[in-house]
Each structure stands twice: as structure tokens, then as C-alpha cells.
Amino acid sequence: MTSTLATGSPRSLFEKIWDRHVVLRREGQCLLYVDRHIIHDGSFHAFASLARRGLKVRRPGQTFGTPDHYVPTVSRSPADAPTVEIRRMVETFSGNVRAHGIPAFELTDDRQGIVHIVGPEQGITLPGFVLVCGDSHTSTHGALGALAFGIGQSENEHVLATQTLWQAPQKTMLILVEGKKLDHVSAKDIILAIIAKIGAGGAVQHVVEYAGAAIRAMSVEERLTVCNMSIEAGARAGMVAPDDTTFAYLAGKPFAPQGAEWERALRYWKTLPSDPEARFDAEVTLDASRLEPMVTWGTSPEHAAPISGAVPQGPARAHEYMGLAPETKLEGLKIDRVFIGSCTNSRIEDLRAAAAVVRGRKACIPAMVVPGSGLVKKQAEAEGLDAVFREAGFEWRHAGCSMCVGINGDLGRPQERIASTSNRNFEGRQGRGVRTHLMSPAMAAAAAVCGRLTDVRKL
Amino acid sequence: MEKFVSLTALAAPYEPANVDTDQIIPARFLKFPRKDGYGQFLFHDLAEDPDFVLNREPYREAKILVASRNFGCGSSREGAAYAFHDRGFRSVIAPSFGDIFYNNCLKNGIVPVRLSEQECADLRALLAKSPGTQLTVDLVSQEVKEPGGKAHRFTVDSFYREMLLKGVDELGLTLSLLPEIEAFERAYAAEPGSGQML
């Protein structure tokens, strides 16, 4: 295990953040201080348990909430939830944040959205922070140079009550993405290629730092996409060292420090990147210039292949569930529905990339776009992207997790084949029997206008 | 939390790798109060699959599962641990686990045991060949014991091992450390870039 505080010895980004947040040590565990705790409408068990113990939220000002998993995307009214139980989840969330004085963007607030879109968008996520949330895709926030990871509801309760969490030091993995990605190859293709290479459990018990020329060249939004799917390789967290791209993105965000505080924070943030001699427990290298657009063919994110390729030999059950025999060509495979959204790919750059493919064309299958936040939606509308999608026959929805996880009732039908920009192609994830193919926004848009898996480079 | 010292119980083998928490409990069941019980949701969408091990006698009554690598990957839903617990499972043995599921087990009185790929494969083969075999998971000696006496060593972090042996969670301990947390906060607040209030 790395991460023992040895002054002067080279440290990684992860170790620098970890060391600064250790309150005390007990046996193999560290009591870690949490800067930001983000909650959502799925955090109800934690509040129920807190109430049973008669405890309060210790630091409501370091807690932030927005409902996303259960919210309807057809409107902003909980009454439009498909069942009473789902409606109750959104209402319970409101009750909890109000009762405990937790700052929150509720459903009718323009700033509401998916927790992993809203945190960075508002500057609630900052470099050097320890940030946790009861959702596995919390790894997303590491793109800003934070240590961010998903926790369970018992851990949620612990953070609510104490603003700390017991954690064992993690192992570290450096993933170097070198080279320059080609046109129409996106951050999504890079992370799918990484997962295909190291496997769905390839980074278990590790915190991953992404580095290399291709990562440096990325926008913050692209880095958020890469870090988002770290958990699909089993990683505890994914991180990118903060740089000028990060600082330019954060400057002026509503919750980012301002004025002299900003200058002071900036000096600290610049000390965060891994020291040149920092050691990692594992290293992986990938050449971005050799990648092409990727799609998944099976029921694990590791079942990803280049669009020009064919279905490889995999577990029999995955072939059966997906209705795809080995050696089937991926390009040309008939698709029934398209979902563009989720914490992986619902930011403005994602919607621009999809709209660029859709413009002047028509969707020939049902397709929907679910922006990641109310502010992303407004921005897209200001740019006329909603009109591009609507004229092509796409549904234009309100912000939420929607068909990525389907808890709000946005589901596909059994045996439907869905081209999805989300992060999980697990059995039943988008509805019982639904067959999910993961891909980038541009590739999903291409699938919508062609009704088939299509190499977007050929459009 | 129920305490766990040692358990001798029927064990079931489950072969697939990368079993995700969406399989363990589909998302649509994640809206019910804990007190209603989550056992009925465990592997719900496999309930009609006659080949699924927990649908077959005698494995139906298993309290220990021996699985494959990266078990419990994916979503952080603690409902996955609730479902195992409420169905009567007290231990899951696998070569590796999704990190969040592993932690959720520790907080729900379920002992997650990491053994090697080979040991897990051998145990699954034993359970498939001799249905009804009981295994012992002993948290004191940190061993999984086969009926023939063969033992497999494992380790659970000593901090959580103590919690499981006593049947307490860590929140009580942490609350007793609040003075230390407050002292940390005072020093930390003066540092640049520390978490300002929202």
C-alpha cells in the first residue's frame, strides 16, 4: 500500500489529497475528512437511519442535494411520476433536505440535474477535495483533481452524522493515454477502450490517475466522461491532475472561491499534480491515435469493440441475452431505440456532438435526449440544439438520470436493442430483457438517423 | 448490526464473473423501506430461471455463496447487501469484489471473503459435485473450512473484523472521536482551498 505520509518523498495526486484529509488512524483504517457530501433522492435509507438514532446532519453547509434518479423527465412535477412510490421518493428527498437545512436544487430549480453534472457545473466540486456521494459514478468528479468516490447508504449516514468516513488506504494505478485521438473519436471511446483492455475488474481496489498527452488535450467535460466510467473498470476513483484547463473551467463558477480566496486556492491547486518521481502500484498505457469509435456488444462494459469489428467470443450467457453470435458484424446491426443522456454523456459538448450528426437528418427510430441539468438544457436551447433534435423527431426531455437506470420509469421494452450514451449495459439495466449497446453521443445520434449501428465517420 | 463469529451453513456455487448489483437487486425495487424486508428481491429477475442455483434444491436454503471474480460490481446500491442479508446470507466468498459492495457487506453483518481464483473454483466444484455441502466461515481464525478439514486462510481488515465480532458499527466509535474531528476542522479551515461552506 502506498499513501503513508513521508515528508519530502515523492507523492501522487491521490496521496497528496489523502494525506491532507486524514483526521486520525486506527489499525488499518484512516478516518478521512469529507469536504463535500452530495446527496440525491436515493439517499433515503441514510436519513431514515439517522432519524432512528436521533442524530442530526453535522455539517449541512458541506452537504448538497439535488434529486435525479427518480425524477420525471416529461415535466417538473412529481405528480407526473409513473407510480405513487416513485413520486414519494422525490417528495421524501425534499422533506429531508428541508428538515436538515441542506442546500439543494429541487425539481423546479433550473439548476437541478444529475448530481455528477451539477457538482462540477456549479463549482461545488473543487481540486484537492474529498467528495463522496451515494452513487458509484461519483468517480466523475475526479476529473477536476478531487478524490471522489461512491459510497453506500450506511456510509452516507456516517458522513451526515460526522463529516468523516473510515477508509483503508488504496492502491494506485496510472493510466497513460498517449497520442492524439483522431476525428470522431471521443472521450467515451477512450474510456471504453481502457475498460476493454483492463477488464471490468481491472482496477478493483485501486484509485486511477489518468495522464498523458491525450488526457491533457481534453476539455474538462471530456475528462469528466473518462473519470465517470472508472467504476466500470472497478476503480475506487478516477482522477486527472488539475491544470490550466481545469482552472479556466472553474473560474467564476457560482460556488468556486472568488477574489483573494481564488488566488490562494489556485496556489494550492498548482501543488497537487503527482510529483515526477511518484510511484504507482500499477501502470497501463494506451495509444489514443490507434482508436476508433467503440460500441459494446455484451452485458459488461468490458465487452467493447471497435465499430469496424465483429462480436468476439465471450461468455455464452452474454451472447444469448444480447441475441448476438460471435463473429456478427457490429456495423449495420438493427437498433430499436436511442437514449442520449446520463452522467456520462449529457453535458453541452455531448449534445453539440450529437446535434452535429442529427442536423438536417431524421431519426427513423424512437429517440430521446435528456440533458444532464436544467442549465445544460437552457444552454442547448439558446444554441438551437433542441430545435435540431425536435425537427429530427427526437424527444427533448427535462434533466434526470432517466433511461440510464430507469428507476423513474423511463424504460425500454423487452428485447429492444438500445443505442445508449450511458455507462452500463448490464442485463435488465434499461428494462427487463432490454439489450443495451453503449457508445458516444455522436455514435448514438448516427444510430438514430440510420436505425442501425453506424460508423459515424462514414456519415 | 448482528454479530458474526463463526458460521457453518449450506453453501451454493455461482459461476458467472462480474455479477453486478443490478442482477443482485434490480433498480425498480430500490424504493421500499428497509423494514419491509429485501430478501424477496435477491436475484429477482432470475426467479423463473430453473438453472439458477438458488432456485434449485438444496441450494435454496444456502447462507453462504461462493462466486467468481469482481462480484457485486457496478452500482453502490446498499439494497444489494440488504437483499443478501434478508434472504439469510451471512457470507459471500469470491476472488474479488466491487469495492462499494464489499464495504456495504461489512456494514450489514455479511462477511465478504477474498480467496484465490483457484480456491474459489475448487470450492464451487466441490459444492456442485456434492450438493448440500456445508462450509464454515470462521471470523476468529479467519478461515473457510471444508467438511473434510481443509482450511483456506483469509483476512478481513482488523478494524472491521472487530466490529463484526462485536456486532457494532463504527458510527458509535466515530461519535466518541468528535473532539478530534473538531480539532482537525479548526486547523484545516485555515488552509488554502479547504472546503468553504455552501
Image (spheres, rainbow, N blue to C red):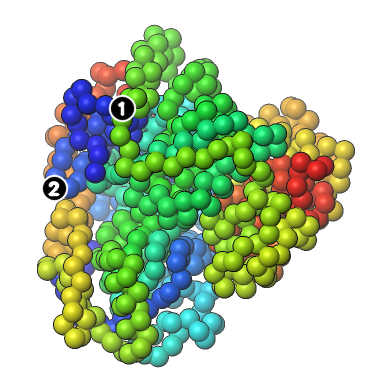
Asked which quadrant contains residue A38, the reply is top left
Q: Is residue B32 left or right of residue A68?
A: left
Residue kind at label 2, given as amino acid type = Glu
* Placement of A233 over or under A283, stated as above or below: below
Q: Which residue is mark 1?
A: A277
Observer-side mark, 2 or 1, equals 1
**Which corner quadrant holds the C terminus of chain A?**
top right
* Placement of A281 over or under B136, stated as above or below: above
In the foreground, B39 or A456: A456
Please report the residue visible at 71 percent of the width from the left and 65 percent of the height from the top.
A328
In the foreground, A302 or A120: A302
Q: Regarding mark 2 in the picture, which secondary structure is present there? A: loop
Q: Which residue is mark 2?
A: A27
Residue kind at label 1, given as amino acid type = Glu
Asked which quadrant contains residue B77, the reply is bottom left
Q: Is residue B190 left or right of residue B178?
A: right
Q: Position of residue A138 (x, y in %)?
A: 45, 43
Please report the residue visible at 68 percent of the width from the left and 59 percent of the height from the top.
A310
* Placement of B59 over or under A91, stated as above or below: below
Q: Position of residue A85 (x, y in %)?
A: 53, 61
Distance between the alpha carbons at the discs numbered 2 and 1: 28 Å
Chain containing the residue with disc 2:
A
Q: Regarding mark 1 in the picture, which secondary structure is present there? A: loop
